[in-house]
């Protein structure tokens, strides 16, 4: 087993770290959406690691995607969500499941961040239970018509391109779901920003679709196959999310190590007290274990192996690790952890998302336990997606 990153991945990791330190950290205080940073990340190829060259990518794979995601999240977890929206659950999903025409129209612009994307799964009455979604899609002969509401949509207020999941017949549950690419600049598409605890640089919206239309060619996969599309998108999205958790946990370690070495109490830096050392050891070990699990999942994806089980475990464990690390970082910082002067309070607020988004900790545990108990295998043969995108068109 070789755990060493290859030179190309190390180079983009270094570039992402440089960008994070030079461009993200100095502007951390203005904790809001920054379009210019997103454009720069697109231009630097951060979203394109897993994409072929002709779609603006570098063909390095999801392991590279994971490593870059980690570095960006280490600086600002809110910017990490872009790796889902400009890559995994929007652009990559369109590339895998879209017609050649649709791929050509949207993928490169998303990867280079010339356009912004969003993914619309969640609804007021359908969160973990996606198969019960209520948003309707109708085939109107020459176009699709969509009506319904979505909640908690990252990039929802700013996205120009959306992958929307909707049902044509609720009685069919997951077999009634379709996935379609929708352009948001049209009458009937309205958004309202959702105020939230953390990840402030990632705008979240409630979206109302009132007679929204999409051309027939924008269907992803077959009619009624949207649940399959969703499952592949979520597996890839979990690589981004769990990498983000590792990056944020690393930020908690960085801050805690610096503070513990500097802060003197009872005549010594607090780093010299065993209970503080114990907290640091826990943070480091949990974060390192999460990193190995996440990278294994990303690597398995790159080898074309089924990886749903491994990435569910990685997502679950990384979510627990980051919440633990953020709590310990607060503890090590004492009163300063509670202060708005240091980013530790932000880490604490941002960390909680990692137990919620892209499948909650409970949903991950169900998937892992059902697999272990022989109730339902998590890793089925890799879904056969239309693979022409791998070859020149
Ligand atoms: C910051 C943020 C960004 C997000 N971005 C997006 C996005 O871009 N696109 C999108 O579509 N969605 C997005 N989401 C929504 C997210 O995916 C959902 O919040 C998540 O799937 C959980 O759904 P829910 O909130 O409806 O919770 P619920 O499903 O109502 O769950 C509530 C609680 O019940 C538990 N629970 C539910 N079912 C079971 C069960 N069978 N067994 C045990 N426990 C169970 C859950 O684990 C959870 O603890 C985002 C959420 C957040 C917070």
Image (cartoon, helix red, strand yellow):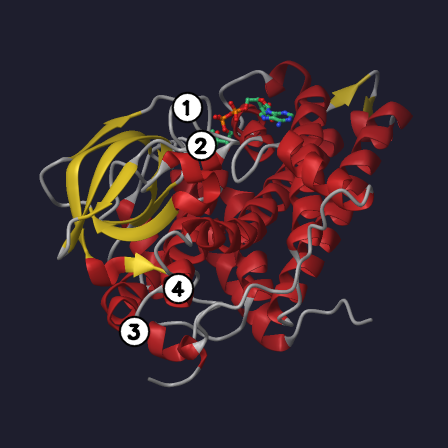
Q: Earlier in the sequence, mark 1 or mark 4?
A: 4
Q: Is residue 82 above or below residue 131?
A: below
Q: CA distance from mark 3 to mark 1?
A: 34 Å
Residue 36 in percent (x, y) is at 27, 50
Residue at image location 13% in from the left, 35% down from the top = 188
Residue beneath label 1, please? 125
Q: Which residue is mark 4?
A: 97
Q: Which residue is mark 2?
A: 132
Q: Secondary structure at mark 2?
A: helix
> Which residue has dot 3 on it?
100
> The residue tagged with tag 1: helix, strand or loop?
loop
Along the viewing direction, whichever of 323 and 261 lies nearer the viewer: 323
First in sequence: mark 2 vs mark 3:
3
Rounded to the nearest angstrom, the CA distance separating label 2 from label 4 is 22 Å
Query: Is the C-beta separation of discs 1 and 4 under 8 Å?
Result: no
Residue 42 lies, in percent from the top left, at: 35, 60
Q: Is residue 229 visible?
A: yes
Quadrant holding the N terminus: bottom right
- Contact between marks 1 and 2 (CB within 8 A): the answer is yes
First of labels 3, 1 by sequence position: 3
| For residue 278, side relative to residue 114 (left or right) | right
């Amino acid at each position: 087993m070789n755990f060493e990153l290859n030179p190309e991945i190390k180079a983009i990791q270094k570039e992402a770290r440089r960008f994070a330190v030079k461009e993200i950290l100095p502007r951390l205080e203005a904790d809001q959406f920054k379009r210019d940073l997103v454009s720069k990340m697109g231009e630097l190829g951060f979203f394109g690691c897993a994409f072929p060259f002709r779609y603006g990518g570098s063909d390095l794979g999801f392991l590279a995607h994971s490593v870059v995601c980690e570095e960006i999240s280490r600086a600002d977890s809110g910017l990490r969500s872009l790796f889902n929206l400009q890559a995994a659950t929007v652009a990559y999903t369109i590339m895998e499941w879209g017609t050649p025409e649709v791929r050509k129209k949207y993928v490169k612009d998303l990867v280079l961040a010339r356009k912004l994307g969003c993914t619309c799964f969640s609804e007021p009455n359908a969160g973990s239970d996606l198969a019960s979604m209520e948003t309707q899609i109708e085939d109107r002969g020459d176009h699709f018509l969509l009506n319904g509401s979505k909640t908690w949509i990252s990039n929802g207020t700013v996205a120009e391109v959306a992958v929307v999941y909707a049902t044509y017949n609720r009685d069919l549950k997951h077999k009634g779901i379709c996935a379609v690419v929708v352009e948001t600049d049209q009458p009937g598409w309205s958004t309202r920003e959702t105020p939230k605890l953390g990840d402030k640089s990632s705008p979240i919206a409630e979206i109302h679709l009132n007679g929204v239309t999409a051309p027939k060619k924008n269907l992803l996969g077959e009619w009624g196959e949207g649940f399959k599309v969703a499952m592949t998108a979520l597996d890839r999205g979990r690589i981004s999310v769990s990498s983000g958790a590792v990056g944020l946990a690393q930020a908690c370690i960085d801050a805690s190590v610096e503070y513990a070495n500097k802060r003197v109490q009872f005549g010594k830096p607090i780093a010299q007290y065993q209970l503080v050392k114990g907290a640091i050891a826990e943070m480091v070990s949990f974060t390192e274990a999460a990193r190995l699990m996440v990278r294994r999942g990303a690597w398995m994806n790159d080898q074309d192996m089924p990886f749903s089980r491994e990435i569910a475990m990685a997502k679950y464990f990384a979510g627990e690790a980051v919440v633990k690390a953020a709590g310990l970082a607060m503890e090590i910082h004492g009163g300063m952890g509670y202060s708005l002067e240091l980013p530790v309070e932000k880490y604490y607020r941002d960390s909680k998302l990692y137990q919620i988004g892209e499948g909650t900790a409970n949903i991950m545990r169900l998937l892992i336990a059902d697999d272990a108990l022989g109730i339902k295998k998590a890793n089925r043969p890799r879904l056969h997606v239309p693979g022409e995108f791998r070859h020149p068109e």
